[in-house]
Amino acid sequence: MILEIDGISTDVREGESLQDIVKRLQLDSDSLKTRPLAAQLAGETFTLGYVPVKKAAEEETRSIRRAIRAAKGKISLIRYEDARGKSVYERTMLFVFLLGMRNLFPDARVHVDYAVAEGIYATVTKEPAFSKEDTKKLLKECRRIVEADYPLKRVRLDVDEAIEMFEKDGQTDKVRLLEWRMFPYFDVYKYGKFMDYFYGEMACSTGYVSVFDLHHTKDGVVILRPDEDDYDKPATFKEMPILANGFKKSADWGKLMDCSVAADLNDLVRNGEIRQLIRVNEALHEQELSRIADRIIKKKAKIVLMAGPSSSGKTTTANRLAVELRVHGKKPTLISMDDYYMDRDKVEREPDGSIDLEHVKCLDNKLFRKHLKDLLEGKEILKPTFDFVLQKRASEGTNLRLDDDSILLIEGIHGLNPMLLPKDVDTDRIFKLYVSALTTLNLDDHNRIQTTQIRLLRRMVRDYETRGASIEKTLSMWTSVRAGEERWIFPFQEQADCMFNSALVYEPVILRKHIYPLLMNVRPDSKWYEEVHALLKFLNYFLDANVEDEIPPTSIVREFIGGNTFYKK
């Protein structure tokens, strides 16, 4: 069979794996930047252990035949710089980490918590407590496992068989997750007697994850991924207290509500306690916003600058915070930084002629800085209004002045960017708030749910409900949106006075009903099929909850599914 691998045509031999072909074509590399980690066939990710042409004595499965046929003989190699490559690498790295833990500390319990910057936080529970010396031993063992280059075999099990095996191994979290699985089979990766399940494909051997490091923490360890500026060296641990505290508070809320993994949430839906969960979760949000309002008043701030990534619920958060400030006797006014957009014909274009709407240069920075300064000095300004239909500033504006009880809330993606502050501004009179949806709900102890996954589901639902946009349309913009976040939002998140975590632990069972039918309509020949397929696999672990009448009209989730009364006159 003739296949085309990264544009190179080659005659594939029987029994030859993709890994064999990559090495034969001299496409392998010692550098993580160029080394293939997996392969893409017709939109789906395959391990390099995949054999395109099996020996005559072996029977090729239907799914593999379909993949080759659908790909029309063309295979693209996936490297670390690709988002799929990073996912493959992370899953394999976690496998090595957990195998090392099992070898050294077989009685320890590990919970993979969340990712902050280039580090994945994990809690380790053992007696005696996990120490710095334990971390050093574990790092040495993990590096030994990588150096040994153990093959990782993908094995398909009957679900009942998998449940029995995980039950014997004491992994009750996986047993509970598998009880909700919709399909009769279950794929695991294993080496020797150790096996684990990760949400998607992995590298074909442990030798592929040579770049990582471990950093000891009070509760366990941070697994450091490759540095984003140089993939061939591990990232350096960075203290990020604002983000870490946000995640910790969310995890504490999950424990308070007895809802930390997918099976917990499904149990609450099944036994009818989901309504109580919604009430408690919404009350926790209300309590947190009240605390933030207290901090704003205590600081005697006159202006609140709010920023956060796409679909983090900034608009609803701003409105709810305004209500809390009113309770404290203040007079909040909400404005959007979007009104300071430059006329489109005045914005500097990219080399290809396009306009990067995420770029800070799209804003009239000079006017914004002047208005902030004037407002803090008690002067009146004429706030501009941007006409999105005409793509230019409207001729009329709004007169605005801050009196003694006034507080101005300004929401926009560049809200935390220091270049938008006047040089001589009194920073004590400005409060900076970072808003993000940092979910700490896991599928199980070892499989975390990425925060971007929930935000993407939110955006898909909102884009369809309010703009009639298809799933493919939202996905086509998502890469650009994420790039804008990485450049203009995340670098400044630690400069905030505090953050508000807009994640709601019950969201998956609400969003599922809205998004699942739309995802099912995406055909296998779509370029976005794998992303859609991954979301469907994720949502298959959750039940639908028909309890939208329980969700308050001012809830964050209402910003996406509809029914948010802040938008009603």
Image (cartoon, rainbow, N blue to C red):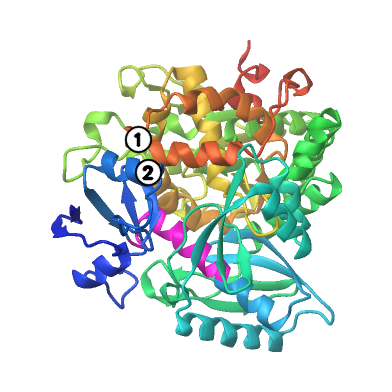
Q: Residue furthest left?
A: 9
Residues under numbered marks 1 and 2 in contact, where contact means CB atoms less than 8 Å apart: yes
* Kind of residue sitting beneath label 2: Thr
Label 1 environment density (alpha carbons within 10 Å; few <14, some 14–19, many ≥20): few
Residue that appears at 79% across and 31% down: 269
In this figure, which residue is indicated by the disc labeled 1? 476
**Rendered view: 105 above or below 51:** below
Residue 144 visible in the shown view: yes
User: Left or right: 428 with respect to 218?
Assistant: left
Residue at far top of view: 569
- Dot 1 amino acid type: Ser
Asked which secondary structure carries label 1, the reply is: helix
Question: In the drawing, does residue 146 fall left or right of residue 342?
Answer: right
- In this rendering, the answer to whether 287 lies above or below 448 is above
Q: Which residues are magenta?
A: 79-95
Report which residue position mark 2 lands on: 479
Question: Magenta region's main secondary structure?
Answer: helix
Residue 530's spot in the image, x, y percent?
Answer: 41, 41
* Residue 69, position as x, y percentages in the image: 27, 41
Residue 151 coordinates in the image, percent (x, y): 46, 73
- Asked if the magenta segment contains residue 94, the reply would be yes
Q: Is residue 207 magenta?
A: no
Identified at 36% across, 42% down, the residue is 480
